[in-house]
Structures are given as C-alpha cells and as structure tokens.
Image (cartoon, rainbow, N blue to C red):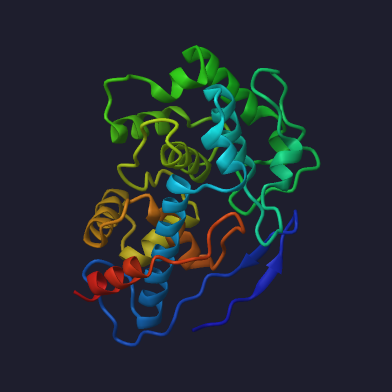
Amino acid sequence: MGARTPGRARGGLTIRHESRAEDDGYRSALAPGLRSTPDAQRLAQELGRASARLQRLATDPTGLYAVVAGERDLEEASWLALLISYIGPLEGAKDPFAEISAARTTWRSGELPGLSDVEPGPRTSHDAARGEETLLAYRRWAQRAGSQAAAFTADPAWAPQQRFERVFERLALPGLHRRARYDLLVTLGALGRYPLRAPGLMLSEDDPVSRAAKRVFGIGDRLTLERRARDLATAVAVPVEALDSALEWWARGERTSADVDARDEDIVARTLAALDG
C-alpha cells in the first residue's frame, strides 16, 4: 500500500494523508469504489472494530462513557455526552478523556467549560475562533424545548430512527459539525439514554466520513451513498452507524484511545464474504 506521510497540526494532532492500494483487479458490487484486495480487507477490519466499539458502549462502557450511562440525572448525562462529542477524546493518550474532564462543568451550574487551553481530540467540533458560540447555541436549543431530555425525546410517538433523523437536523447549530452531532446521538442511543437509532450516515457535509464513503461506494450522490451504505450494513448485519467510524478509520488510519482496539472477527468474516459475494 502507499505510504502515509504523518504531520503535526495545531493542538498536537497527527495528520495522516489518505492513500489507497494499487488496483489488483478487485471488484465488489456492494463497494464499487474499491479496487484492491488490501483496501477491502482493511474495510472489513475497521467495520469489525467499529462494531466492537458499539457493542462495548451498549454493554460495558468505559471512562466518561460509563459516567454518561450511569448518571441518574438525565440532564447531566446529556450535557456530558455533548461535551464528549464536541471536544472529542484524545488519540494515543493514557486517559483519552483527560481534557474533557478538566474542562467539564455541570448543566445545573449554567457555566460553560473553559476551552481556551483545551486540547481537542481528532474528531472535535470545537473551533477556538468561535469561542463559546457553539455551546451557547446548544444551551439555547435545549432551553427552547424546555430541557435537554425534551429536546432529545421530541415526539414520544416517533420511532428511534425517525427521532434520530429529526433531532440530527435540529442540532445543526453553528459550529456543531456532522460528526459531532452524529456521534452524540449514536452515543446517547448506544448507552440507552434515549431511543435513538441512525437511519443512515446522514452525510450532510463534506467531512472525512463523506469523502471516505465516496471512495468506497464509488459515487458522489448523497442519496446513492446512503443507499449503498445501508445495503452494506444489511448484508453484514451490523447497525449502519458502525460505518461512520469504520469509514473514517479506513481512510485515515486513526482511532482514539477511547475506542476499543479489539475486532469482532465474525463481522470481519461476514464483511469479507459480503464484499466478495
């Protein structure tokens, strides 16, 4: 495979340039953008890792994820989940949640986290130039609904997938990008705090996940990308939200140390079989 050239960005984040293996004649109806066996194998491995991460969130969360899962006060749990997704766990750190813990405030206090010196994770939505704008917008969003719980629940009659889609759209706040919104709702759903289930990848922006999806599925049209993503998830029998992190890891080779490194080998095997089918 082509070599990756690492670099350093502001905040100490590692930048890895996307590369792909040479075309060896590999073709897959489910992933028509793939042109090499190593790329298909890596996608299967990352989907196995992403699925294992979702399983861990649902059954045995760690770090601040465990705090969100166990917090009695749903308002505090929701606020902490937002901070995790907004700031982002660190990559390659002994404690990936250290920066989030240091900046963390309580919802009840009304205070905003001190973000001037925070080191964000690689999937962060925080932009220092915006200051507190995004978090203030989030607080106003929740206050308009009456509470965070009311905002995330919305209409109790909605199915989990419908709720995810509607709340995702309503969370399009200044500075809160797709990955943070998506990760927030996936996290709250996986941890059992709200009935939320992604209906698709919700590719609303040109971000690393969207670019990886275009490479894997061989097309730029968002509706077709969403359909092909769902088709692959259905063929492998995994939640479509597992593809969000799997696609980004596949393209960039990055994971945070908050993510499990274990793979679900059954899913790796099922993915390879589905791609080769």
Please tell me whether residue 32 is drawn above or below residue 194 in the rendered image. below
Instruction: Quarter of the image for the C terminus: give it.
Output: bottom left
Please report the residue visible at 69 percent of the width from the left and 41 percent of the height from the top.
Answer: 100
Which residue reaches farthest right? 117
Residue 111 visible from this viewpoint: yes
Most foreground residue, 189 or 228: 189
Most foreground residue, 161 or 193: 193
Please report the residue visible at 57 percent of the width from the left and 64 percent of the height from the top.
Answer: 254
In this picture, residue 173 sits left or right of residue 92: left
Please report the residue visible at 67 percent of the width from the left and 41 percent of the height from the top.
Answer: 127
Question: x, y (%) of residue 119?
Answer: 74, 48
Question: x, y (%) of residue 157?
Answer: 26, 21
Question: x, y (%) of residue 89?
Answer: 63, 49
Which residue reaches farthest left? 277
Which residue reaches farthest bottom? 24
Residue 85 visible from this viewpoint: no
Residue 159 position by quadrant: top left
Question: x, y (%) of residue 273?
Answer: 24, 74
Residue 78 position by quadrant: top right
Please report the residue visible at 38 percent of the width from the left and 56 percent of the height from the top.
Answer: 243
In this picture, residue 31 sits left or right of residue 123: left
Most foreground residue, 72 or 120: 72
In this picture, residue 48 sits left or right of residue 158: right
In this picture, residue 226 sits left or right of residue 126: left
